[in-house]
Amino acid sequence: MLESRGIRMPKYAPNKMPAAVKRRYFELLRQGVRGAEAARQVGVSLSRGSVWFLDAGGVTISEARPIASRFLSQNDRSRSQIAWPVASR
């Protein structure tokens, strides 16, 4: 319909960003910059940054390891607070 009026719709084209931009985006993420801020700094949309992140595999969360025995459990902490009350100031 729009083409009949002389308006051509853009055809799909993969992202034409240079690889250096994508590398910089991931460098920023590794430095702890939030995704939205990293995308803004490299000049891409938040959605483009999200696509790069998901295409790269996202974040995998490993299973929680048991806490080392050198740390007190919650029950141990509760018992120690009862046994050794903090002096009031």
Image (cartoon, helix red, strand yellow):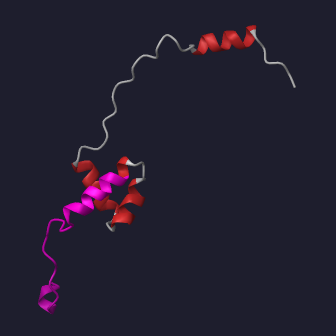
When the figure is inspected, residue 82 is found, relative to residue 52, above or below; the finding is above
Q: Quadrant of residue 41?
A: bottom left
Residue placed at 42% from the left, 53% from the top?
34
Residue placed at 87% from the left, 26% from the top?
89
- Left or right of 14 in this view: 50: right
Residue situated in front as seen by the camera: 34 or 54: 34
- Left or right of 67 in this view: 61: left
Q: Is residue 59 magenta?
A: no
Q: Quadrant of residue 1?
A: bottom left
Question: In the rendered picture of this protein, how many numbered marks are placed on residues?
Answer: 0
- Left or right of 45 in this view: 2: left
Residue furthest toward the right? 89
Residue furthest toward the bottom? 5
Residue 23 lies, in percent from the top left, at 26, 56
Residue placed at 36% from the left, 54% from the top?
28
Residue situated in front as seen by the camera: 72 or 75: 72
Residue 68 lies, in percent from the top left, at 46, 14
Q: Is residue 9 magenta?
A: yes
Residue situated in front as seen by the camera: 68 or 74: 68
The residues colored magenta run: 1-28
Residue 64 lies, in percent from the top left, at 39, 23
- Left or right of 80 in this view: 33: left
When the figure is inspected, residue 77 is found, relative to residue 48, above or below; the finding is above
Residue 80 lies, in percent from the top left, at 69, 10
